[in-house]
Amino acid sequence: MKKSRPNFRIVEERDMFPYDDFIRDYQNLDLSKSDLQKKYNLSDGQYYSKSKYAKQVTGFRRPKGCYSESKTIYISKTSSGKYCVNKTVNHCRVTGTFNDLKTAEMVRNIMIECDWDKETMKNLRSVYGGKINKMTGNQYSTPLKNEALSKYKEFKKLYFKGEDNTYDIMRKLGFTKYMYQICLGKLKETYPNVRKPLVKS
């Protein structure tokens, strides 16, 4: 009696994970970590590796404790009716108070992207947190802000082209981190749901 030979099937495994979709969702703060894990069926370990890749590709880092109610994360309303953006970083409070929620949300988003840089908050307070000019209805400007906005069109072109990361754009335009954030803030006012294209390898 002949012994039956076991049948072996070689399966070629390929990573079919939708990285582009995940990266876009990773940058969407309306989705929490648990939302992402559920949507992409990820364990804690898998989520860690995928999010690490997303951070390397985009330079974007989600804030710790980012939940689905993140539209108001790091923002609180004061007794005077203004809006305070604040977070404690390395035992130091990084904070700024602004006249309206829209401005506070914009500042909060900028601060998340620059990893709560104190100097950036200081500059944002001076630009968006000051008194309103009664003649023009605008916040007082600064020389750095004016210089940054004078290169806004070039910034917008480089940003959407997707060939340069943040630091390459800063180098090409001669921007400080603050100047980059000024142009990014203006871009997000015009395109609220904008996401930086992936840098081509």
Image (cartoon, rainbow, N blue to C red):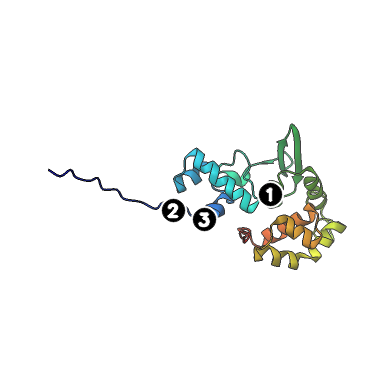
Residue type, numbered disc 2: Arg
User: Which is more toward the observer, 155 or 94?
Assistant: 155
Where residue 94 sits, quadrant-wise, is top right
Q: Can residue 45 be seen in this view?
A: yes
Name which residue lies at 26% across and 48% down: 7
User: Mark 3 or mark 1: which comes first in sequence?
Assistant: 3
| SS of the residue under disc 3 | helix
Decide which of tag 2 and tag 1 comes sooner along the chain.
2
Q: How many C-alpha atoms fall within 10 Å of the one at disc 1: few (<14), some, or many (≥20)? A: some
From this viewpoint, is residue 32 visible? Answer: no
Q: What residue is shown with label 1? A: 113
> Residue tagged by mark 3?
21
Picture layout, residue 159 above or below residue 56: below
Front residue of this view, candidates 17 and 110: 17
- Secondary structure beneath disc 2? loop
**Dot 3 and dot 1 residues touching (CB under 8 Å):** no
- C-alpha span from label 2 to label 1: 33 Å
Residue bearing the label numbered 2: 14
